Amino acid sequence: MSTFTIFLVLIVVVAFLLIVVIMVQNPKGGGLSSSFGGGGTQQLGGVKKTTDFLDKSTWYLATLLLVLILASNVAIDKGGSNNESKALDSDAVTAPVALPETPATTNDTAPAQEAE
């Protein structure tokens, strides 16, 4: 298993945990849900310790996901090939290739007319 595969598996696991943690949280009552009448029946307090844990775990998982994504870029196998652009390379500049000219086909004789 390459290091990129390990990073990929960790990214998927952390993303799944982040989705689960976000889905478990209770809505805070702000945003669009309260403006359409959905926020009137929610509790104001709730369980404070659970809310703090879920909020902190959301931030930690989101930060971990970002770090894993950035670190996985280092682990990508480059394949040993040179993938740099040749647009700015002065050695790679070649003269444009001229297309061969085709001889002009001119028909100096008038087309044969049928005798009537």
Image (cartoon, rainbow, N blue to C red):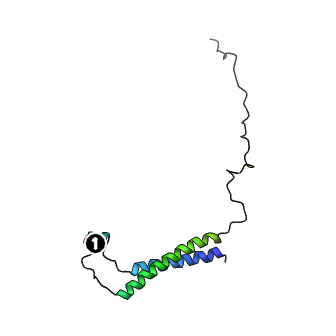
User: Residue 54, how many percent across, how many down?
Assistant: 42, 83
Q: Report helix, strand or loop for mark 1.
A: helix
Residue that lies at the very extreme toward the top in this rendered image: 116
Residue at image point 73% right, 48% down: 90
Q: Amino acid at mark 1?
A: Ser
Taking 35 as reference, is 7 left or right?
right
Q: Residues within 10 Å of mark 1 (few under 14, many from 20)?
A: some
Task: Work out whether 109 lies above or below 77.
Answer: above
User: Residue 68, how many percent across, how many down?
Assistant: 57, 75
Would you identify the image quadrant in which residue 111 lies? Answer: top right
Count of marks placed on residues: 1
Instruction: Check the picture and name the quadrant holding the N terminus.
Output: bottom right
Task: Work out whether 114 lies above or below 12.
Answer: above
User: Residue 38, how many percent across, how many down?
Assistant: 27, 74
Q: Nearer the viewer, residue 101 or 69?
A: 69
Taking 75 as reference, is 45 left or right?
left
User: Residue 43, how many percent across, how many down?
Assistant: 28, 82
Residue at image point 50% right, 76% down: 63
Residue at image point 68% right, 51% down: 88
Name the residue tied to disc 1: 34
Residue at image point 38% right, 84% down: 51
Instruction: Check the picture and name the quadrant holding the C terminus.
Output: top right
